[in-house]
Image: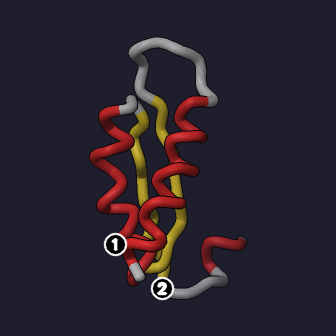
Amino acid sequence: MKKYLLLPLLAASLALAACGKSGNDTKKLVVAATAVPHAEILAQVKPILAKEGLELDVRVFNDYVQPND
């Protein structure tokens, strides 16, 4: 199941990275996620995004109410 989610997540992340202005400056993307499986998937995407100049900050939450406040 992780493999099926990784490709769409990677495509969406790269699309977001391409929306910024050009240059060598690093952009920061903050994402709220549950620990399993979302944070694990984002951990796999993090080095790929770093190569594209996008720093990924994953904030892990234990329930769905906290990130929606």
Q: Nearer the viewer, residue 10 or 69?
A: 10
Q: Residue at x 39, y 29 (%)?
A: 53
Q: Amino acid at mark 2?
A: Asn
Mark 2 secondary-structure assignment: loop
Question: Which residue in the protein does label 1 denote?
Answer: 40
Q: Residue at x 50, y 71 (%)?
A: 33
Q: Amino acid at mark 1?
A: Glu
Front: mark 1 or 2: 1
Q: Residue at x 48, y 31 (%)?
A: 27
In the image, residue 61 sits, relative to residue 13, either above or below, namely below
Quarter of the image with the C terminus in it:
bottom right
- The answer to the question of whether label 1 and label 2 lie on touching residues, with beta carbons closer than 8 A, is no
Q: Quadrant of residue 24?
A: top left
**Which badge, 1 or 2, comes first in the chain's sequence?**
1
Image x and y of residue 16, in percent? 59, 40
Q: Residues within 10 Å of mark 1 (few under 14, many from 20)?
A: some
Q: Nearer the viewer, residue 6 or 69?
A: 6
Image x and y of residue 25, in percent? 42, 19
In the image, residue 14 sits, relative to residue 7, either above or below, namely above
Q: Residue at x 32, y 44 (%)?
A: 48
Quarter of the image with the N terminus in it:
bottom left
Instruction: Report the colour scheme.
Output: secondary structure
Left/right placement of residue 68 relative to residue 60 reads: right
Q: Which mark is residue 62?
A: 2
